[in-house]
Image (cartoon, rainbow, N blue to C red):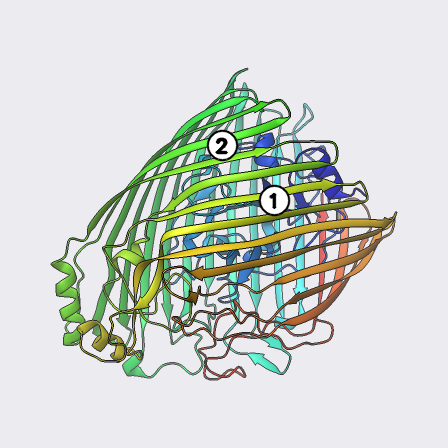
Amino acid sequence: MKFPLRRALLSASALSFVAAPNAVMAQQSDAPEDDRSDASDLLTDTIIVTASKTDPLQADNQSPPDQTAIPADAAGIAARTPGGALVKNGALSGQLSYRGFFGERVLGRINGQRFASGGPNAMDPPLHYAPSILIDRIEVTRGTAPVSQGPSLSAAVNAQLVGTRFSDSAELAANAYAAGQYRSVDNSYAVGGQIGIATPRWRLGVIGSREEGDDYDYAGGTAVGTSFERQLYGVEGGFRAGEGEFFVEYRRSETDPTGNPPFALDIVYFDTDFLQAGYRGQLTDDLHLDLRMGHVTVRHLMDNQTTRHPAAPVTRARATFADADTNTGDIALRFGSDTRNVTVGGDVEMIDKDVTITNPTNAAFFLEAQPNLSSERIGGFVQWHGGIGAAEFQLGARIDRTSQTAGVPQLGAAVPMGPRMLAAAFAASGRKQDDTTVDLVARAWAPMADIVPRVTLSRKTRVPSLLERFAWLPTEASYGLADGNIYVGNQSLKPEVAYAVEAGVDFDGGAFTFRPTAYYRRVDDFIQGTPFDATVGVLDTPVEMVANMNGDPTPLKFRNVDAEFYGVDLDFSARPAARIVIDGTVNYVRGMRVDIDDDLYRIPPLNGRVSIAYEGDRFAIGGELTGAADQNAVSVSNDEDPSEGYMIVGIFAQFSLSDDVKFEAGVENIFDTFYQPHLAGRNRVEASDVPLGERLPSYGRGVWVRASANF
């Protein structure tokens, strides 16, 4: 059994955790083959999720235990990283909040592939497509993402699924991995696995998973409308050519009827296809090439009839169809060694979106709420990695040109006059916007005996989303804010510009490690929902009249404001005795408007966790305390309510029959504590035990069991 933090810091590598949440005993993860260097390792947190998987085709066969039930929503795992928190919008629709940022401000990818969400309200944020039972690791950049990872205002997240690696032996080798879990709190199960064959020159593998759960229980009742279903299957392959690899992979993700109480509609289906191919590896001793092309197709239906209890009356029945197609291409050439190099590259991203709202009982009622939206971006970057004496540096710059357009909305004969007037006004508007953005990132660190001080300065940008810019119809679509407000777009929006500084130190004292980071970020032209006009509640515009028809006489319009964020986060570990491990995290962030006296919306409160475990030769037992303080710094302009703090306790046990077969079990929320996380969405389901409009409480007491094996 190896102590992960000490090893990670000594090797100037990433902090490693085991599956959801922290690791009690974790080994160092193999680096991904396409994008690793000492700099990115030092500045990346790697959460090993299925570390119980010991691939026979890998040299490292150690098996660390998991410490809690693996949630279906992978965002709940990513939120375990220092600086992270979970925006819980449903069983499969959560988002990672990182140092106060969430949504499209945090770049999300699966297997290194970026893509556009299909749902206008982000029912399928990127991690929706990463079943936890199939995740090998989740990588979260520490602070600001480097320019080589593409445009993003803050951090970048990448969920790497299990896969087949090349064989170390000269002969054909085969492997199989399987895992399964049962969780009583929502009567859910998850099963998944991978089968692969490989030689030193080629590899071929398939993966698959199935998850299903009922409405979950909380202390005092049942949160009705929270059941879920999802399956994924795929195939991948690779061929070595010299020191590089040609690779290709295809996956199909199918989400069946799944409840989303914070939203007006629930998921009926997401049918999504992922395809990507490329090359990664050395062309010569001093030249490395990364080449990737990808395509993602999302087909989505949501309604208030299939799983909503009770179903909406006929006159308010809605079924919304949403499509999203993303085509991407990336190329990067690295000149030099792993630690002394210059990388130049470029990337292109083309997105097409359509959203049509219908009444399933009336064929004459339909509106194209997002008509033929298109975004085309092309970017280029240069990044240098070098050093002076003991100091190491990573300096990068990128420039992007983005063009966004919208079509003319079509409406059915049964649509009333108000929306028709808005559609006509939108059709007569420009419906086109071009933006040029520039990002700059400078990182520095100095490895010393026991400490690694580090600092980052950055200027990062985000172009307004297609929704924020072209939402002509007042609806609740807000990319997952789920606050009950109605929003309308703004074609005059400027790109967000964030200036950030962060400083921290990684300390390794052998039996004790400590990694604090302090940061400050000023965001000019931050995009926020603001009152539509100065006469709030007075219905004197078509937008307010239509919004009132939809239940909210005080709509919000996306506008540029000014904001700032500051805070500190840290993680630590200690081994007071040979077989006892203690570790934890602490997070604090404050987000405020600068243009007016107000706090920003959905900022997590001070929170943290600490775990302790005893490690035996083939078993481990332990527990974890998780808590959050009251949150009283809330947004008045978004009608945000304060929240109360809480503390919950869970316990676990693990037993390994061998390095390849493991059994785990535990009890979550052992005292059946009632608590409502500040970032939880609000209930919209009438038949639930949760009152309408209340924050959804989290899971009550429940047991979980899990088994995994490698063959």
In this figure, what is the number of numbered marks? 2
Per the image, label 2 sits on a secondary structure element best described as strand
**In the structure shown, which secondary structural element does the residue marked by tag 1 occupy?**
strand
**For discs 2 and 1, the disc positioned in front in the rendered view:** 1
In this view, the residue in front, 157 or 633, is 633
Residue behind mark 2 = 247
Q: Which mark is residue 45?
A: 1
Q: Position of residue 665 (x, y in %)?
A: 75, 62
Q: Say if 453 sits above or below 665 in the image.
A: above
Q: Which residue reaches farthest top?
A: 285
CA–CA distance between discs 2 and 1?
Answer: 25 Å
Q: Is residue 295 left or right of residue 473?
A: right
Relative to 440, is 63 above or below? below
Q: Which mark is residue 516?
A: none
Q: Quadrant of the N terminus?
A: top right
- The earlier-in-sequence mark between 2 and 1 is 1
Q: What percent of the width, then of the height, locates residue 455?
A: 56, 39
Residue 641 in sight here: yes
Rendered view: 663 above or below 347? below
The structure residue drawn at horizontal position 62% and vertical position 49%, both measured from the top left corner, is: 193
- CB atoms of marks 2 and 1 within 8 Å: no
Name the side, left or right, on which 64 lies relative to 271: right
| Residue name at image x 46 percent, y 40 percent | 458
**Could you say which is closer to the camera, residue 530 or residue 253?**
530
Please tell me how crowded label 2 is: few (under 14), some (14-19), or many (20+) other residues with Cα within 10 Å: some
Q: The disc labelled 1 sits on which kind of residue?
A: Asp
Amino acid type, callout 2 = Phe
For residue 668, say whether it is visible.
no
In the figure, residue 645 lies in which quadrant?
A: bottom right
* Residue 491, x across and y down, in percent: 23, 56
In percent of width and height, residue 116 lies at 38, 50
